[in-house]
Image: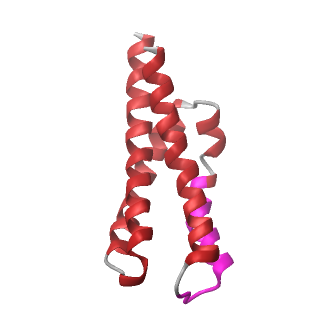
Amino acid sequence: MLNNLLLWRFVTFIGLFGMIALIVIWNGWLTPSQYINRGIEIAIFTMPLLFFVRGILYADREKHIAITLLSFVYFCLGIWFIFAPDESIYGYIMTVLSLCLYFGGFFYVRALDKSKS
């Protein structure tokens, strides 16, 4: 059971920190065109994720549940960016990382609940 907890926690880490890194790197340096200020766009996209960093690092069950709900927003954004011709790669990566975030958080809570009972 401990292996499952560590695996899904690691998947959640990959999803969360990968998403933060992707947003900062893409919007900071790699974006082909910007319609608003880069700093504002980075802040808007990363602030919801940053609220959950401490809870994910300290394995808080409620934060893992909440991050699964937030991952749906980033999944929808990823699908939106897939259809933008200049940012389709960004959309694909965001979609994959949001799925890592969702499955990691969901299965971590599920494995945690099984280990307690």
Q: Is residue 103 magenta?
A: no
Residue 112 visible in the shown view: no
Rendered location of residue 117, percent (x, y): 40, 10
Kindly identify the residue that appears in the image at 63 percent across and 53 percent down.
Answer: 50
Kindly identify the residue that appears in the image at 37 percent across and 64 percent down.
Answer: 92
Give the vertical position of 18 relative to 66 (above or below): below
Give the vertical position of 5 relative to 25 (above or below): above
**Left or right of residue 63, residue 76 in this image:** left
**Left or right of residue 21, residue 39 in this image:** right
Q: Quadrant of the N terminus?
A: top left
Front-lying residue, 8 or 74: 8
Rendered location of residue 56, percent (x, y): 58, 38
Front-lying residue, 103 or 3: 3
Quarter of the image where one finds residue 72: bottom left
Rendered location of residue 10, percent (x, y): 52, 34
Residue 109 visible in the shown view: yes
Q: What's the magenta bit mostly, secondary-structure-wise?
A: helix
Kindly identify the residue that appears in the image at 46 percent across and 18 percent down.
Answer: 3
Give the vertical position of 40 relative to 75 (above or below): below
Q: Is residue 35 magenta?
A: yes
Rendered location of residue 112, percent (x, y): 45, 21
Count the marks. 0
Q: What colour scheme does the image use?
A: secondary structure
Kindly identify the residue that appears in the image at 65 percent across and 85 percent down.
Answer: 37
Outermost residue, top direction? 117
Residue segment shown in magenta: 33-49
Front-lying residue, 53 or 89: 89
